[in-house]
Amino acid sequence: MKKKVVILRNDILPLSETFILEQMRLLKYWHPILVGRRLCVNGLNLTNIDYRIIPKAKASLMQKISVRIKNLLGVEDKRTASYILSLNPDLIHIHFGTDAVSYWNSIKNLDIPILVTLHGYDINISKEWWQQGKGGHFMKKYPKRLVSLSKHNNVSFIAVSEAIKNKAIEFGIPASKIQVHYIGVDTNKFKPRGLPLSQRDNTVLFVGRFVEKKAPLQLIQAFSQVVKHIPDAKLVMVGDGVLKKKAESLAKTLRLPVEFKGALKHEQVLKEYDKAKVFCLPSITAKNGDAEGLPIAILEAISKNLFIIVTSHSGNTDIPFLENIGLVINENNIEQMASSLTELLKRNSKVDIKDIGLFIEKFDLLRCSQKLEKIYSEVLI
């Protein structure tokens, strides 16, 4: 009989979290149950996924508000604890430190091993930012509560890159409780398709949320210089977020051929990779300290054999042979980004990945999922 792992998120599941579903689908020896407090509107398709929404007792509006505040404060919710216990899990796996803190008081006494995956903003954003209430009044004590729960014997952590592990240690989480494990990418699904790069239009592709650390505005500024040298160049931007309207306004002001696709389903994103020649994700460290973990989009672009441009930033340095498949630039250097985009768009050769075997060994989703199951088993010991 397979062991059970409850995968906890507050909201299940936004379009940007396909990686959680992909991990779940490839588990062989564990039965995953996705559990959340709310179902996302226009979220991921959860067909054939065992998912549950924690039942809510009938309550007045004020009672519902009270429950919401308790969730944010991490106050014990016995109904949540009882529901999770009723699923008879052998392990609880929580994605994001923020969700771990939210659920903590409800699950800490369940006598079930707890594994928390740290992805990026949940450990990179400075403690001061949280403490000043910039993440919301009820999250002021987030740093203190995350460090506190990390000291419990039944809790351990996964960091999605070496950079995230180092940040977690700086944050105050014991190094002995953290191991690095990559999310991975389905290298069978993300195979090169479409025309050879030399025959494709001069299209630059961006895939990511429109937030400060993804630097979408910087990319548009750099692209304004590219079209001076390559008039038929086009920029396609996939994703949504708080900076999207500003990005659209900037592109309109500069009169640039930028196509904003919005948030797309995975199958649609695949088609965009197959049409592009260069993938660019110019990640930076945001003013509040937020930084990437290891963007899955970069791994997808590598698997698709696109030319890539990324910054020497956070988890990007975990990827081997980056210089062999594109260009690595400095953060916040728009001139360097523009010249790099121009250079790669003018290349007529194909991507030469001599060490593809090493890439697959580190980042193939199936292999990563097998390693995750080993981690699950180790946590039980």
Image (cartoon, grey):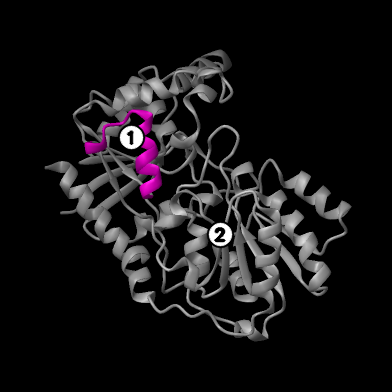
Among numbered discs 2 and 1, the one appearing first in the sequence:
1
Q: Please indicate whether residue 342 sits to the left or right of residue 121 in the image.
A: right
Q: Is residue 276 visible?
A: no
Please tell me whether residue 284 is drawn above or below residue 264 in the rendered image. above
Side of 208 relative to 21 (left or right)? right
Using the image, determine if residue 351 lies above or below residue 333: below
* Residue 166 magenta: yes
> At numbered mark 2, what does the secondary structure look like: helix, strand or loop?
strand
Q: Quadrant of residue 226?
A: bottom right
Q: Position of residue 178 (x, y in %)?
A: 27, 41
- Res 32 seen here: yes
- Identify which residue is drawn at 37% across, 21% down: 145
Find residue 163 and report its horizontal and vertical position in percent.
40, 46
In the picture of the structure, the residue carrying the numbered disc 2 is 310
Measure the alpha-carbon separation of dots 2 and 1. 25 Å
Q: Where is 172 relative to 266, above or below?
A: above
Secondary structure predominantly adopted by residues drawn in magenta: helix
Give, as a single range, the part of the protein colored magenta.
Answer: 161-176
Under tag 1, what secondary structure? Answer: helix
Crowding at dot 2, Cα within 10 Å, few <14 / some 14-19 / many 20+, comes out as many
The residue indicated by pointer 1 is 169
Quick one: label 1, few (<14), some, or many (20+) residues within 10 Å?
A: some
Is residue 38 shown in magenta? no
